[in-house]
Image (cartoon, grey):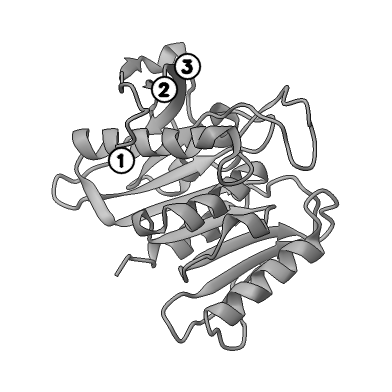
Amino acid sequence: MNKTVLSVLLLTIPLWLGVRSADARTLTAQTWQVDGVERTGLIALPEYDGQTPAPVVFVFHGHGGTAAQASRSLAVHTAWPEAMVVYLQGLPTPGRLTDPEGRKTGWQGGPGEQGDRDLRFFDVVWQDLRDRRAFDLARVYACGHSNGGGFTYLLWAKRRSVFAAFGPSGSIAARDYGPLEPAPVFHIAGRQDTLVKFAWQERMTERLRRQHRCGPGEPKAGNVTLYPSAIGAPVATYFYDGGHTYPPEATGHLVAFLRGQIKR
């Protein structure tokens, strides 16, 4: 653990003080102290059968969003009841494309920004979960939309060994992120996205397909195209007719993809 992390304080708050999910699955508010700053999130515990270790999915909201908002729009816990789903909350952060003053909540935009405070936040939460819960270390995933998708790519670049696969949406990996070690990825993009331009995202997925030695695309249900990989790191795309808003119908396809990815 980084020496600058002062402590981890876990507080559990009843749902009736926080957020209720659409399918009545409990979302528990939790708090951690990271470098003397209170950080928060919402956790959906899995429907555990007592025998099978649960997968874990980390979900990151977009710039100006909240963990509660992400739990409603991405709703990964609804689509995957057997998984522990962790919706983390960002802090006021200058955006690379909007909000240069940093009035809205979000995630560090690149390595070293904000003193890597969000990478350290993830490290604290990850260690805390490992200390307190039993889950499947071969099935840990990260996904997020917009700035949260960018942070998902940053976790890929800087914490690859933790994860089995990634699900970024409306985002790209900036050049200063460094190399991305091959990993399965499900990328969601709107063809009319004018903020994180669709052309940028399309080039991002083309780059990943080359790096992962992918074959021709195989159309699947909905808007999904799967590109099998010769090195075990498939790339899947969900390109939809829309702008920068996350498409809720994509979550079922995202979860179906993640379910099939196990860290080797």
Q: Is residue 219 visible?
A: no
Residue 3 on image: x %, y % = 32, 31
Total marks placed: 3
Kindly identify which residue carries mark 1.
Answer: 46
The structure residue drawn at horizontal position 68% and vertical position 49%, both measured from the top left corner, is 247
Q: Residues within 10 Å of mark 1 (few under 14, many from 20)?
A: many
What label sits on residue 35 in the rendered view?
2
- In the rendered structure, the answer to whether residue 221 lies left or right of residue 2 reads right
The answer to whether residue 87 is above or below residue 198 is: above
At label 1, the amino acid type is Pro
The answer to whether residue 121 is above or below residue 209 is: above
N-terminal of the two: label 3 or label 1? Answer: 3
At label 2, the amino acid type is Asp
The answer to whether residue 86 is above or below residue 259 is: above
- In the rendered structure, the answer to whether residue 257 lies left or right of residue 188 reads left
The structure residue drawn at horizontal position 24% and vertical position 40%, both measured from the top left corner, is 130
**Among all residues in the image, which is located at the extreme top?**
17
Which of the 4 image quarters holds residue 85? top left
Residue 183 on image: x %, y % = 46, 68
The structure residue drawn at horizontal position 54% and vertical position 40%, both measured from the top left corner, is 60
Q: Residues within 10 Å of mark 3 (few under 14, many from 20)?
A: few
Q: Secondary structure at mark 2?
A: loop
Kindly identify which residue carries mark 3.
Answer: 18
At label 3, the amino acid type is Gly
- In the rendered structure, the answer to whether residue 193 lies left or right of residue 85 reads right
Nearest to viewer (mark 1 / mark 2): 2
Tell me the quarter of the image containing the N terminus. Answer: top left
- In the rendered structure, the answer to whether residue 196 lies left or right of residue 204 reads right
